[in-house]
Amino acid sequence: MATQLNLPIGVQAFAKIRTGGFYYVDKTPYLHQLIDEGSYYFLSRPRRFGKSLLLDTLKELFEANEPLFRGLYIHDRWDWQIHHPVIRISFADGVMVNRSALDTRIRHLLQSNRERLGIEHSGAQDIAGEFSDLIRMTHQQHGQRVVVLIDEYDKPILDNITDADVARELREGLKNLYSVLKDADPHLKFCLLTGVSKFSKVSLFSGLNNLRDITLSRDYGAICGYTDEDIDTVFAPELPGLDRDQIRHWYNGYRWGDERLPSVYNPFDVLLLFQEREFRPYWFESATPTFLVKLLAERGLYTPRLDTLETEAALLGRFDVDEIATEALLFQTGYLTVHKVEQPMTGYWLYTLGYPNREVEASLNQALLPALGMPRAAQQRISLFRALQAHDLPALETHFKALFAGLPHDWYRNNPIAQYEGHYASVFYSHLAALGLAITVEDAGNTGRVDMTVDFNGHIYLFEFKVVEQVPEGRALRQLQDKGYADKYRGQGKPIHLIGVEFSREQRQIIAFDVLSL
């Protein structure tokens, strides 16, 4: 059995990982390809996905720190005699609440780079001039073209995204900085900007038309994160005592681009699982998405559809202060990922999004429950779990009726989501999904799609939802029977339960919970 190494939790310094006895997943094949194919790149990935480590690896590579790369893919494919100077800028630390604070931070970062590279201040009075002079003078003094690496390029804007005026102010400040790169081409060897969101070129990268966005490139889908192969090889010493299938269900599933390519794990999740030896929503808990939850509630999103959300490629990159598409927000922040890519006609790309894994589905729905009118969500989840654990269907009916009866009258009157037909199914689904159950929404069979399937504790539950003001009473269970939705599950040897749930919009309550066990 291989020797256990140190877990690189929170370690973003490549040199520390390579000299400190830490596990390391070799990403240098991707870096070799990047550098071989071009010079200017942009990469978007969710938080805690290893972007900072990737940039630090590039820094050590261009600075030709050869001992750190011994035994890695790129070692025998790199010219270690050439040392490129590196300008490294990161907005990861701190929160800037106005343009003045941003400008102060930028000047500090430029000064730090000058000191490290041995460059004198040119005397430029403006930030664009300082940055431009730093690149030019570094090239002249070091005799090699410059590498520019920018980490968390968008964080100052995202930290203020709920205040549009401040966010616009900071966007203009960053645009002023990044615009320098367009005319610095004669002095640049390589440039990579990374962040969570993808702002349009017009709003933030005006004129930088040679910036290649590799976010959805099939060649770089696993440039950040761990694949199944990485888990089974690099981290093999950590696997004994953990359920391998559960690791996959809970933490794997992130994809950027072609669904035929390997999906990846969030490194933060996996490393903490190996340390704590318990399945928990480590990544989700590391930063509560309050803004996201508020926005989803305001837009009245039908939560069961989050796992089958269709969107055009253009919408995935449409993120700006003045226009934040729901699909782009959920995708870029990591709460949804690519499940399917289609090109139904030439040049028209269609993406189907869904939850990457059980952790995100359960945690996001758990966070949404108060916005759906369930402030006592934790106690209600315990009651739901006990009913399902005992397979007590009458208790399940009582639980859901009490749940809907407990939704405050003022909440119905004041919250726009209550106007949507899918509100009832959203409450039902999100309440179940928050437990981390195996749920399939719009479960397809050869006769149609059942609204929701739950596989738990040796039982299969098939749910169909109807609103009685729209269809006659009794239709929910009848549809489950007439369509033969249970047929696809009969071979599993598990008890199957058809449950027709009917809501009344006028009574704001479940008026039928019809059950047929097979």
Image (spheres, grey):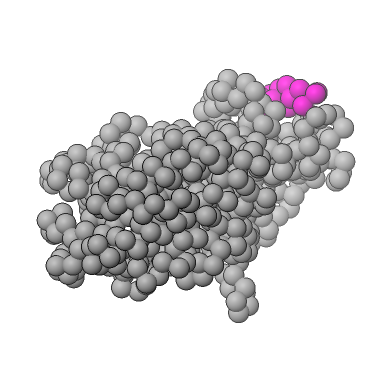
Which residue is more in the foreground, 225 or 159? 159
Identity of the residue drawn at 34% across and 32% down: 278
Q: Residue furthest front?
A: 123
Residue drawn at the location 78% of the way across and 42% of the way down? 420
- Residue 349, image x and y in percent? 59, 70
Magenta stretch: residue 398 in it? yes
Instruction: Let me know if residue 342 appears in the view.
Output: yes
Q: Name the residue rendered at 19%, 39% in the picture.
A: 6
Q: Main secondary structure of the magenta part?
A: helix
Q: Residue at x 67, y 31 (%)?
A: 371
Q: Nearer the viewer, residue 2 or 33?
A: 33
Q: How many marks?
A: 0
Q: Is residue 31 above or below residue 504?
A: below
| Bounds of the magenta segment | 397-411
The answer to which image quadrant residue 466 occupies is: top right
Residue 373: image location, x then y, percent? 70, 28
Q: Quadrant of residue 78?
A: bottom left
Which quarter of the rendered picture does the C terminus lie within?
Answer: top right
